[in-house]
Image (cartoon, rainbow, N blue to C red):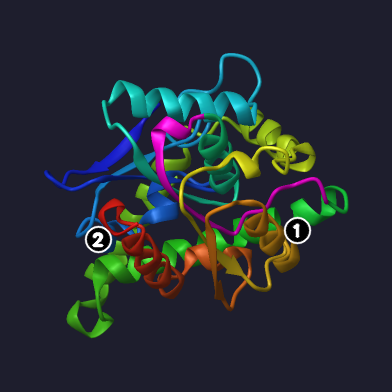
Amino acid sequence: MFYRQCLNPGKPTIVLLHGLAQPSSFAWCHSFQGLEAHYNVIAPDLPGHGRSDAPRSAFRLLDATDAVAQLIEELGLGSVIVAGYSLGGVIAQYLGALHPDKVAGLVLSGTGYGGRTNGMWRLARPLINLAVGAVGSGYAVHKLVKGPSRELPEDLEHNIFESVENWMRSEIAGHNYKAIAEASRELLVYDTREHLPYVEAPTSVLITTTDEAFSRVVQEEMAALIPRSSTSYYQGGHLSCLTGHFHQEFVEICAQMHPHAV
């Protein structure tokens, strides 16, 4: 399992789990700088995504959960804050319930308990949007790298955008689309409701209010099933994770989950 790390000696650790078909570099590019003030940051590419190896057989949510738990164990991280969005939020739920010794706190957003889908289209639509949103993500990274356009000559600006585009291509070049398709199938049938009452860690749920993949109601019901949960709201849909404004709020919530403060 490949992972990115922002070392911050003496600080507790937060593990960031990304969504479907996004490597950790795309998913968390807006969050790294804000989080490293509070945490040692670990951001793995989930199995079959980005630079991580594909599963040895099929992608299974519980296997991916065990893989993240094993990473935490092998790195000697102890008990960590786990923050997950979408697919990563589902794995974070399982981690909290099945590996409580690894989890000091949870931050969940853009995710739900499953068990209530309207067929493939409900998932397919945000996935189609995600492909479109990747263009927006690339533009956001482009702006992050180049700064205001007036500061750069036109030819240099083009070269920087080209380098960012090449970087994006290299990041997704390792995707195993069989594993991603299997993960999509898993997201249609999983159900964490029987597990959530066993989550012992304090949990903060940032609800995306107009989410196309996980409705506001499902997110609220998920939070209600977790004994030590609190909720806050972000006015946006499932692709909110591609915007810097969302990540500002996300970082603030993660900072409040600092183990010394819970």
Q: Secondary structure at mark 2?
A: helix
x, y percent for residue 45:
43, 37
Indicate which disc, 1 or 2, sits on the residue closer to the N terminus.
2
Q: Is 107 part of what is drawn in magenta?
A: yes
| Foreground of the two, 167 or 50 | 50
| Residue positioned 56% across, 20% down in the render | 55
Where residue 104 sits, quadrant-wise, is top left
Q: Which residues are magenta?
A: 99-116
Look at mark 1 in the image and give the residue it sits on. Answer: 125
142 sits left or right of 124 in the view: left
x, y percent for residue 124:
76, 52
| Residue positioned 41% across, 67% down in the render | 247
| Residue positioned 41% across, 31% down in the render | 101
The residue most toward the top is: 56
Look at mark 2 in the image and give the residue it sits on. Answer: 33
| Foreground of the two, 182 or 148 | 182
x, y percent for residue 209:
65, 73
